[in-house]
Amino acid sequence: MKYPASFSRSLLAATISTLIILPAHADHVQYNKILDTVLVSAGALDAPNTVVTDLKAPRQPLPAHDGADYLKTIPGFSVTRKGGADGDALFRGMAGSRLGILVDGETILGACNNRMDAPTAYIYPEMLDTLVVIKGPQSVQYGSGNSAATLLFERNPEPFDEPGIRGTASVLVASAKRRDALVDLQAGAEQGYLQVTGSDSRADDYKDGDGNAVHSQYHRYSGSVALGWTPDANTRVELGATRSDGEAAYADRGMDGTRFLRESVRIRIEKKDINEWLSEIKFNAFDSSVDHVMDDQELRRPGMMGYANVARDTKGGRFSSTLKPAASLEWVVGADVQQNNHESRSAPASGIYGDWIRDGEIKQTGLFTELSWLLNEHQKIVTGYRADRWRALDERTTVSKGMMGKVPNPTAGEHRRDTLGSSFARYEHTQNTLPLTWYIGFGHSQRFPDYWELFSKEGESSSSAFALKPEQTRQWDAGLLFDSRQWHMSSSIFYNDIKDFILVDYTSMMKSGGYSRNIDATTYGGEWSLAFTPNKQWKFDASLAMVRGDNDTDNTALAQIAPLEGRLGVTYNAAKWSVGSLLRLVDSQDRYDLNRGNIVGKDLGPSSGFGILSLNAAWKVTPDLLASLGVDNLFDRQYNEFISRTGSNGMGGAIPGYEQTFRVNEPGRTFWLKLQANF
């Protein structure tokens, strides 16, 4: 799995060169049809509790080329601002492993003990095709403990009917000297295909609305290759490999990330329409490694902390079969496994590293079944159950006590084993006189504590959190979808009763790095989306997201709950061009729990409300070439989000050469221009 250090950049350059010399008579296949307008909101439900969005569509506000920023256009998501890229995502106030994240079937995990490299830092969205968001514990097919949501970043390669070459390419320039380039090239025939993708994204420090530079420069690049065999229309066997790397400056801590190296190999096998009772089988397996370096030497004025190098190896696989015991029944049964190991080493400013030290191992084996029963043409029941066996090994000999240094680990060498279950049931009803579907559901999820909760934090009454209880979520969901020629409306509401919610508490001076403890909590809220198209030219969008959380154990607000947020969009779409606007309105937040939160961050205090206006335009130069441009934060407002990190060096002072801020400020006025081409 080791590639030459220049693999990703060389792959991108070679692929772009290939595009330049493509023969004029190459077979042209229209795929990934370019949208005519800029996407400002992707919150409408495509199915009960499910949102599907096109990852190649231009978006506003302009996202960083990572997985977290792309989620901002979906109501209910928040992203913790740390710098220019690599934020950490929350949905309905829930973070960490409450969000199950899969990229083309691979489980993605970071390595940094303090979440510098969130899982989404290793996702390059525009190299993929679609994002599917399943809200709440309303599926059991994609892993264990996904109590908040399941995020499926997917490629959707289309088969070739005859020999040919096709692809997409895009370039983007923006404020802060941002420059992005991406290419996705496919060549194939009826019997198989080769897909090569590459991307490169870089930016300097951005400036906030007051004109102050924020320590936020980054450079990210990635390359992947996939070789597929399609002996017939119903069979696909694919081998693939991916390599990505980069560096990023951080405005919220004393170190920056100077290596984000991820390497993975994978295999996927799919067979459809096998016989009358077996409609599909799927198998995939992957082996992925992350090598992450943090230091205070390369991207800022050199300090005394030196280097920290962390690594994680993750292996896993999944098998499922879809049965059709009757015309009205679809039954999915399957199993999945995962194992990940974590290790670290460090070096002083001289760069001479010590030995690698293993600190933990987590294994999971799961069995799942999901049944969809069409009662009649208007009514459907969907239900599922999964059981998971979890094992964890504590390999730490010492644990950190913050300013007190390291002390012996009281749980060194201990094993823990838990068998956990998750289930859900949902009723869906489609009206026969209206284009309306409504649903109601209940889900129960048991979540094993993740690496950051078990190994990176102390316990409430111990220097180790290895005995932390699993988290149990019971969630009620309801919603509706209305889709007519002029109106598209959707809403989803929820109520959560969470037992043994894992709270990370940063209030203790003796446990300055935070400690994990179990509490009981309640959350409720929802998302609403409306689109009105009175004619072919005009479109009006509106969305609203609200969530409220209570810490029932401490009788306080639950930490890290974003305030009320609304979006208003207007688009005028002519034959070959469009113009649009986005007004984002965020309420103030005075419900907080100071210095308590989760593995992603903590509440810093109250926040002010704000409104941000952005404009965009797009021109369909040809059916296969789209130019889009925009200005985000038109009035150059200085603002920050409630969900954010402190703008400092992590020790109460400013990063040398930069202003210290209470929260990391958001970008000021940002201009951008993007060109996309299909061929």
Image (cartoon, grey):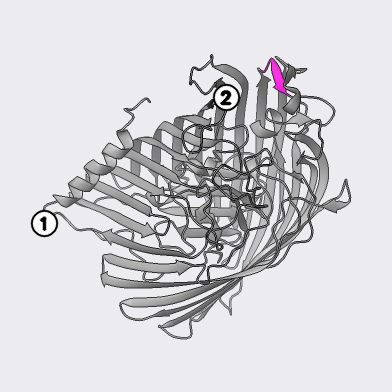
Q: Which residue is mark 2?
A: 342
Dot 1 falls on a residue whose secondary structure is: loop
Instruction: Report if residue 481 lies within the magenta region.
Output: no
- Write down the region rendered in magenta: 396-400
Q: Quadrant of the C terminus?
A: bottom left
Of callouts 2 and 1, the N-terminal one: 1
Q: Residue 454's quadrant in the figure?
A: top right
Count all numbered tags in the image, as a single digit. 2
Residue 530 in percent (x, y) is at 58, 74
Closest to the observer, 562 or 494: 562
Q: Report the side of 645 relative to 17 (left or right).
A: right
Q: The residue under label 2 is which amino acid type?
A: His
Q: Are marks 2 and 1 in contact (CB under 8 Å)?
A: no
Closest to the observer, 175 or 551: 175
Rate crowding at label 2 as few (under 14), some (14 to 19) or many (20 or more) other CA atoms within 10 Å: many
Closest to the observer, 534 or 563: 563
Residue 416 in percent (x, y) is at 72, 22
Q: Residue 491's quadrant in the figure?
A: bottom right
Residue at coordinates 33% horizontally, 59% vertically from top-left? 32
Residue 378 in percent (x, y) is at 59, 68
Give the prevailing secondary structure in the magenta stretch: strand
Q: Quadrant of the N terminus?
A: top left
Residue at coordinates 60% horizontally, 46% vertically from top-left? 370
Q: The residue under label 1 is which amino acid type?
A: Ala
Give above or below for 232 relative to 534: above
**Mark pair 2, 1: CA separation:** 50 Å
Residue 197 is labelled as none
Q: Which residue is mark 1?
A: 24
Residue at coordinates 88% horizontally, 47% vertically from top-left? 554
Q: Report the side of 522 relative to 601 (left or right).
A: right
